[in-house]
Every structure is written in C-alpha cells, then in structure tokens.
Image (spheres, helix red, strand yellow):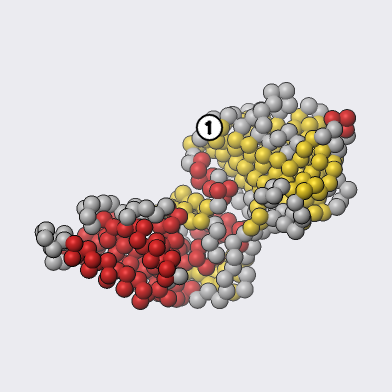
C-alpha cells in the first residue's frame, strides 16, 4: 500500500494523475492506517521543496501558507451556505503558484485526511464488500436458464434461426444464421441480479448494456409485425442499429420509446420516483408525442413528461464503471449503491438534505465508497453483514 501511495503522490506533484488516480490518492491519504507514512511523505517533499528554493525568495511568508490553505478549504471544500449545501466530493484546487501548486494540493489532501479520520474510525466497517461484476442469467424460450458468468465461451444455444454465443470478453451475441425461421419467434429474457451487469448484441446488431437488477425481454429474431420490440425493467443503455423500415421500440413501465437508430439510456427502476430517458445521439419519440433531442432527458411521472437539458455523461457513467453525482441526495445515491453492491440500506434518524456532486469509481470496494462520502462530514455509515446503516 505504501508503494502505491508514494507512486500516486509523486505523480500528483507532477500533475500526471488521472481523475481516478486523484480519487484513489485521496482515499489512501484519508486512511488512518497510512497516517505515519503520509506525514513522512509530506515532510520529505516539503523539505526538498524548501531546499530547492534557498536562492530565491520564500514562497510563503511566515503563516501565509496556513492562511492560503485555510482560504482553499473555506472557498472550495467547506463553503458557508445558507440554503441546501451542495457537497463537492472532489473539489478543484485553484493554482497558487506554479512552483508550489503540487505541494499545496498534497497539503489539501492531508487536511482532508485529518478532518476525515474520525469519520473513517466511526464507520468501523466490519467487512469488505466487493463491487459488482459481469454476470447475468439468460432464460431461453423453453425455460432453460444459463448463468452466463459460469458458462463457457462459444455457442450456448440456437433460437429461431439465431445462434446464441458467449464471446471471449464475456458478452452475449445473437447471430442470425437462418432467415427461413423469420416467421417463428421465441421469447428470450436476459436478467441481472443486484451486483451484476451485462452486454448483449441483439439479432439486428443493436447493442444493449444492462445495469444491475434489470432485465431485457425480446423476441428472436427480434422483428415481429415489422417492429423491433424489447421490454425493459430497470436500467439499460442502447446503441440501436439503424433500420428505417423496422422501428425499434422499448417498453418500460408506463413508457414506450420509439427510435430508428440512436444512442440513449433508460432508467426505469420500480423504486425510483420517475422513469428517465436520456438521449445522446439521434432522436427518440416517447409515448407517441414527446420528441427528445441529443443532450435532453425526459422524466415520466405518472402520465406527465418533463423534458430538460442534461449532463449525458452523468446518465451513462454506470456503463463506464463510475458513480456520477449531480446535485444528488443521499437517498438516491444509496439506492444505486444498494443495487451495485447487493446490500440493503437502512436510514436511522433524520436524513441529511445535502446534495452531492462528484464521481467515484464503481470498481472500489463498498467501504472505500462509503469512506469518500463520509469524509464530507455530512453522513455516517455502518456496515452490518450486508446491511448499510445510514445516519446523519
């Protein structure tokens, strides 16, 4: 662990860390087990920095360094706010001076570690819960079920003229070999449990990424009565192959989305307050009357649809292995964590009304993700078995 921390620390001083590596560095420096090593690192590099400046004026006058750091914390980390606070998980540190920027950034991390130490200790995580992984269950038309995580690569089955295979990189692919069975359709269902995600290439070459606790039901060879139709429960990202003759229709909850060829995401979990449809490319029509443009999101609540511009990167961050929070309440965040880590969440007492902004890799263990959230000093967590208890 010490070697990894030192490696990331050196890269940060050179501004070479990626956003994910910066996040990892923060987690390592916030861990009380690394306290002594962090102090040694800071002391060593500060002395090295000071020696390199002996022939020039002091970078900081006495006490000035502390004042600058205090300003950074008040301005970027713990701003005074009257209304609902928006908690920045990964604040951007303003450049102080080219020669000292790396050290100031490191000191910023150090202060965060000091302020977060008691929270890390209070959380007292009793076990390490691993993140979700690639996996799903394929249910064929005859009722046979195939656990894809356990299945060997290669051909799995043949359905209505289509060969069903698992690729070497763990994807499900339908390859339409025989059009003579086009009149015959067989229903297949791809489903993920909590803590699973999977990708499928449908018989028309459209690609679908299925999020955790979701399912996609479709006919093989997909086209029925001139329409390519699928039914979604949960969340999925679609890259629909263009076919002007055969519209692609996604039914989810009380919503029907019709497209010809486009990229979009649908979040239709039953425990979410609205069905969210986000368009990245092309055009979609919702319930035969609402048309979305790229960069827009539709919220369906009951029968009412509201359309607004959206950060599309945030909507599909799950597909790229991240949690992305944009003014998001802790209840919403914990629903996502519950699905990905296959845990139950219990709130005790008043629930914080803070709104969170930031990005965390979903490849981290649960305790790391909760540690980052608790470092904001707005929420506390305790893990008991597969239950996460949340308090203010």
71 lies left or right of 153: left
Please give the name of the residue rendered at 56% of the width and 32% of the height, measured from the top-left corner. 281
Q: In the rendered view, would you say 7 is above or below 359?
A: below
Please give the name of the residue rendered at 57% of the width and 71% of the height, measured from the top-left corner. 128
Where is residue 259? Give x, y as percent. 66, 30
Q: Secondary structure at mark 1?
A: loop
Where is residue 190? Give x, y as percent. 75, 48
Q: Is residue 3 visible?
A: yes
Q: In the rendered view, would you say 60 is above or below 119?
A: above
58 lies left or right of 77: left
Q: Quadrant of residue 175?
A: top right
Of residue 1 and residue 20, the one placed in the foreground of this image is: 1
Please give the name of the residue rendered at 57% of the width and 74% of the height, measured from the top-left corner. 127
Quadrant that contains the N terminus: bottom left
Where is residue 272? Give x, y as percent. 61, 51
Q: Quadrant of residue 39?
A: bottom left
15 lies left or right of 275: left
Q: Is residue 377 visible?
A: no
Q: In the rendered view, would you say 176 is above or below 134?
A: above
Where is residue 339? Give x, y as percent. 62, 58
Q: Quadrant of residue 285?
A: top right
Of residue 80 and residue 258, the one placed in the foreground of this image is: 258
Tally of marks? 1
Please give the name of the residue rendered at 76% of the width and 40% of the height, measured from the top-left corner. 174
Where is mark 1, residue-wise? 294
Mark 1 crowdedness (10 Å alpha carbons): few <14, some 14-19, many ≥20: some
């Amino acid at each position: 662990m010490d070697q990894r921390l030192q490696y990331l620390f050196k890269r940060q001083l050179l501004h070479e860390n990626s956003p994910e590596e910066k996040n990892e560095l923060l987690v390592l420096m916030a861990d009380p087990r690394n306290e002594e090593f962090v102090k040694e690192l800071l002391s060593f590099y500060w002395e090295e920095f000071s020696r390199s400046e002996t022939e020039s004026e002091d970078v900081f006058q006495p006490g000035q360094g502390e004042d600058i750091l205090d300003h950074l914390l008040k301005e970027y980390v713990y701003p005074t706010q009257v209304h609902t606070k928006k908690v920045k998980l990964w604040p951007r540190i303003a450049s102080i001076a080219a020669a000292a920027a790396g050290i100031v950034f490191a000191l910023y991390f150090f202060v965060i570690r000091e302020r977060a130490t008691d929270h890390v200790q209070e959380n007292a995580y009793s076990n390490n819960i691993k993140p979700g992984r690639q996996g799903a269950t394929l249910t064929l038309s005859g009722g046979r079920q195939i656990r894809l995580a356990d299945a060997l690569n290669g051909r799995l089955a043949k359905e209505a003229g289509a060969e069903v295979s698992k690729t070497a990189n763990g994807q499900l692919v339908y390859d339409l070999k025989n059009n003579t069975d086009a009149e015959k359709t067989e229903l297949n269902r791809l489903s993920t449990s909590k803590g699973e995600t999977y990708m499928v290439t449908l018989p028309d070459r459209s690609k679908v990424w299925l999020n955790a606790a979701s399912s996609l039901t479709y006919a093989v060879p997909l086209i029925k009565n001139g329409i390519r139709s699928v039914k979604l429960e949960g969340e999925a990202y679609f890259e629909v192959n263009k076919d002007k003759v055969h519209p692609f229709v996604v039914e989810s909850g009380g919503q029907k989305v019709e497209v010809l060829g486009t990229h979009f995401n649908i979040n239709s979990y039953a425990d979410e307050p609205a069905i969210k449809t986000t368009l990245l490319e092309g055009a979609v029509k919702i319930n035969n009357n609402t048309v979305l443009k790229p960069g827009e999101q539709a919220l369906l609540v009951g029968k009412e649809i509201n359309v607004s511009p959206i950060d599309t990167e945030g909507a599909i961050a799950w597909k790229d292995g991240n949690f992305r929070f944009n003014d998001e309440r802790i209840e919403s965040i914990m629903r996502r964590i519950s699905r990905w880590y296959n845990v139950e969440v219990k709130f005790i007492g008043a629930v914080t009304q803070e709104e969170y902004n930031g990005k965390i890799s979903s490849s981290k263990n649960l305790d790391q993700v909760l540690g980052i959230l608790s470092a904001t000093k707005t929420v506390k967590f305790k893990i008991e078995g597969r239950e996460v208890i949340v308090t203010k």
